[in-house]
Image (tube, helix red, strand yellow):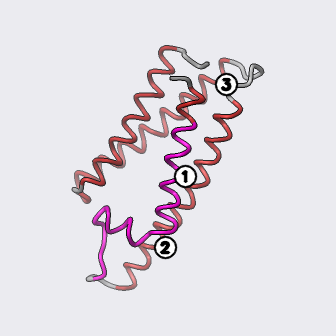
Amino acid sequence: MKLSSLLRINAILYVITGIAFGVYSPLMLAFFDIMDNEGSAIIYWYAVSFARMFGAALFGFGFIIWAAGGSIISPLVSEEVKRKTGLAMILGNVILLVVALTQQVSIWGTSAGWIMSGIFLALLAGYARILFMKSWD
């Protein structure tokens, strides 16, 4: 797989997840079994508003990654820029994976948490493979 293809896949996943958290925040919180309406209403709506903000951030990062995937295929882009882009995506996905696994083990304990961790692990493995095989194009 090429770097540009993986960046596009990553971007699509982030945009879709961003839309889900931004538009369907209460459903996403229920999917992760984070909170339900049985607790404090104020805390619940704080969690919903934070989930919406998280969705907006994912949505924006998805489009930034999409733009990077489109411009990375240009012959004018040096191999160093491609390598640094790959390293940045590895670092980002390592952090996401560690946080998701930590939350999964300590708080969520749901299948949704394992799915999210698996997605981050798959993206991390894809970027690591591309970086070490130097298959930019």
Q: Is residue 15 magenta?
A: yes
Q: Nearer the viewer, mark 3 or mark 1?
A: 1
User: Which quadrant would residue 60 be assigned to in this image?
Assistant: bottom right
* Residue at which label 2 appears: 49
The quarter of the picture where the C terminus appears is top right
- Front residue of 54/6: it is 6
Secondary structure at numbered mark 3: helix
The residues bearing labels 2 and 1 have C-alpha atoms spaced at a distance of 18 Å
Q: Is residue 83 above or below residue 117?
A: above
Residue 120's x, y, as percent?
40, 41
Q: Earlier in the sequence, mark 2 or mark 1?
A: 1
> Number of labelled discs?
3
Determine whether, in the image, residue 17 is placed left or right of residue 77.
left
Disc number placed over residue 36 in the picture, else none: none
Determine whether, in the image, residue 88 is placed left or right of residue 126.
right
Q: Earlier in the sequence, mark 3 or mark 1?
A: 1
From which residue to which does the magenta span run? 8-37
- Front residue of 4/102: it is 4
Disc number placed over residue 15 in the picture, else none: 1
Query: Which residue is pictured at 26% across the width and 59% down the height?
Result: 108
Residue 34's x, y, as percent?
30, 67
User: Which quadrant would residue 41 be assigned to in this image?
Assistant: bottom left
Which residue is farthest top?
133
Q: Is residue 22 above or below residue 106?
A: below
**Circles 2 and 1 in contact, beta carbons < 8 Å:** no
Label 3 crowd bin: few (<14), some (14–19), many (20+), radius 10 Å: few
Query: Which residue is pictured at 63% across the width and 24% down the height?
Result: 82
- Give the main secondary structure of the magenta stretch: helix
Q: Earlier in the sequence, mark 2 or mark 3?
A: 2
User: Which quadrant would residue 32 be assigned to in this image?
Assistant: bottom left
Q: Is residue 21 magenta?
A: yes
